[in-house]
Amino acid sequence: MLAHSLVAVVACVGSAAAVSVDPLPAPRSIVWGSAGPIAVPDLVAVDLPTSQILADAWDRAWGTIVGLRWVPQATQAPISSYEPFPTATAAAASPSTHKRNENEQQQQLQLVKVNVADVDVDLQAEVDESYTLDLAPGSDTIEINANTTWGALHAFTTLQQIVISDGSNSNDANGLIIEQPVHIEDAPLYSWRGIMIDTGRNFISLPKIKEQIDGMALSKMNILHWHLTDSQSWPFDMHTYPEMIRDAYSPRETFSRSDVSDIIEYARARGVRVVPEVDTPGHSAAGWQQIDSSIVACANSWWSNDNYAYHTAVEPPPGQLDIINNDTYGVVENVYNELSDIFTDNYYHIGGDELNTNCYKFSAYVTDWLSSDPTRTYNDLVQYWVDHAFPIFQNIPNRKLLFWEDLLLGDPHALSVPTENVLVQSWQNGIANIHNLTARGYDVLVSSADFLYLDCGFGGFVTNDPRYNVQSNPDPSQDNFNYLGDGGSWCAPYKTWQRIYDYDFTTNLTSEQAAHVKGAVAALWSEQVDDTVVSDRIWPRAAALAELVWSGNRDERTGGKRTTLLTQRILNFREYLVANGVMATPLVPKYCLQHPHACDLYYNQTVIT
Ligand SMILES: *[C@@H]1O[C@H](CO)[C@@H](O)[C@H](O)[C@H]1NC(C)=O
Ligand SMILES: *[C@@H]1O[C@H](CO)[C@@H](O)[C@H](O)[C@H]1NC(C)=O
Ligand SMILES: *[C@@H]1O[C@H](CO)[C@@H](O)[C@H](O)[C@H]1NC(C)=O
Ligand SMILES: *[C@@H]1O[C@H](CO)[C@@H](O)[C@H](O)[C@H]1NC(C)=O
Ligand SMILES: *[C@@H]1O[C@H](CO)[C@@H](O)[C@H](O)[C@H]1NC(C)=O
């Protein structure tokens, strides 16, 4: 784990600067030698196994290397290059600088040899994503080994970050170099590494979804959790029920079946699985109500945040599938079967969050069912859903279900849900809920809102909110503090990349519990997001999560957090994302990226533990 301490040294016109070639996420193990970089010509022979996915991915990676001639912009430098106090006697160690290796003039990279043990292994959960990448001392060949196509793709995104340009572009050199020797052994800590987008609250177009997938591929994330619909809109054009699309925002803001297949193919070509979520039975009005209004409860109720006793939804508009109406299940089955036809991942997300009991007071089916047996509770009602809907969802070969933790921990919640073939997505109470679920034997996906919700901190979206009508700065200690209270940005503040990276989500778990944690997904709910801002809400913050779940946030030697090392890496990666067309937001004044650690809060580099 020495990546951070080694730098490729590059001669620039007029000055020499140490240039980091740390890829993001940091590999599990990367060992550089110090022989000095060798030149990389624009045309390098490549020996690839026969695979269209590999051939395309190689063309993209190499095309990027040659097309961008990327000069890493953020350097790694020791903190000792600054003087802490005027009285300090510290001799500032200047970053070591070397001339370009003389080898470079004679020696060039000739070949990239890619070996894949089995190119036919499908992209599914838990697939082997490991790879090794070697450039031996004095060698002119990079050798990549992987067990699957998907591991090889990760090797390519590493390679494209470590072949850099020295900034020169003279007659005798094209500027491309790679430090050598280098030996990388890499594999992810967690098999689920993702982001969630929401195309139900606001529409997000195909090109913008692809832009997210590009960022994911570069940061080795592999799950696009696609929250496709919600009670506000149904953008997906179903063949089974063509009337559902009437609840899209407009004919332009829709996805055809071929659009969806296009996204799935695009993602797969980049090692990303697409896991769809059509939320049920909560968050369901749009689309469903077009088929049969009797299968949707409370769709026409006032959400009633003002008179909380009548509250029917966490946000407007209300609507939940009627659990007792028998007709609900035939519709659910037809919708599910059509979606399963298109979304071929073994996992499918059935939603399951935020069921509101008041909503069912609008359903005669439910109120009759409850009153016909006074021992029945709303927990029994949720159990009825599990007992009747799960068999439909599980009636597909190899199908595994993903759902929000509310089905188990919400009020109301089900009384008995099997632990087999399910994965529970935790979003509330941070580590406490992860602890609870794993102790009960459930596999867990971490999306804790306090750390991983990317939409937080932008204020409330509900309109006509009188709590904003105060002529002084709101008092955070008050319940009705405008930006934290009900209806405000409930999950404020904004989660910074440091907040994300420093999240130790397996704290206090036994090793048996920790083994149930399958990974993490950063969620971007889209009440205040569409094409105009989606990329800057997600990037580069999602890259902090990408590294957290790929190689962790700790230095294997010291056990300490390596946030200080991620700093320059993520600042550089942000520049790289933008260069690759992913419109990531700036994290700092550019000064901070060009002056390593000058913008740190403390001089002490190990203050984060
Ligand atoms: C491939 O699989 C073998 C056997 O499971 C394993 O030892 C190796 O680390 C894997 N990865 C690579 C890159 O070979
Ligand atoms: C639903 O179907 C079952 C079995 O066919 C039947 O016993 C029950 O009365 C029906 N319930 C409703 C609410 O229609
Ligand atoms: C999990 O939380 C539920 C609901 O609060 C509680 O009843 C249960 O005892 C908890 N289980 C564990 C193992 O912590
Ligand atoms: C972990 O457990 C310790 C000891 O019970 C407790 O003090 C601490 O708050 C726990 N940490 C978290 C994050 O839950
Ligand atoms: C830096 O911070 C860590 C963590 O608080 C502390 O253990 C260490 O002593 C500090 N180092 C210096 C030089 O102050």
Image (cartoon, rainbow, N blue to C red):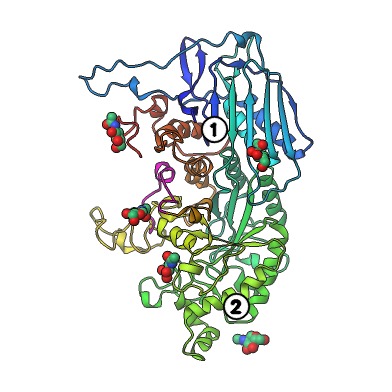
Judge left or right: residue 471 versus residue 106.
Answer: left
Q: What x and y, as percent, mark residue 302?
A: 44, 74
Which element type, helix, strand or loop, lies under badge 2?
Answer: helix
Where does residue 578 sit, x and y in percent of width and height?
53, 34
Work out whether 11 lies above or below 510.
above
**Residue furthest to the front:** 511
CA neighbours of label 1 inside 10 A, class few (<14), some (14 to 19), many (20+): some
Tell me which amino acid carries mark 1: Ser
Q: Nearer the viewer, mark 1 or mark 2?
A: 1
Image disc number at residue 75: none
Up the image or down, 460 lies above or below 147; here it is: below
In the rendered image, the vertical position of residue 126 relative to residue 569, given as above or below: below
Q: Nearer the viewer, residue 134 or 294?
A: 134
In the picture, residue 82 is in which quadrant?
Answer: top left
Name the residue that disc number 2 marks.
295
Magenta segment main secondary structure: loop
Residue 366: say if magenta.
no
Circle 2: residue type = Ile
Tell me where residue 109 appears, x and y as whole percent. Answer: 67, 18
**Residue 502 painted magenta:** yes
At a point 54% along the width and 36% down the height, the residue shown is 28
Figure quadrant, ligand 1: top right
Q: Tell me the tag on residue 29.
A: 1
Q: Residues within 10 Å of mark 2 (few under 14, many from 20)?
A: many
Report whether residue 262 is seen: yes
- The residues colored magenta run 490-508
Q: Secondary structure at mark 1?
A: strand
Q: Nearer the viewer, residue 461 or 446?
A: 446
Question: Which residue: 57% across, 26% down?
Answer: 162
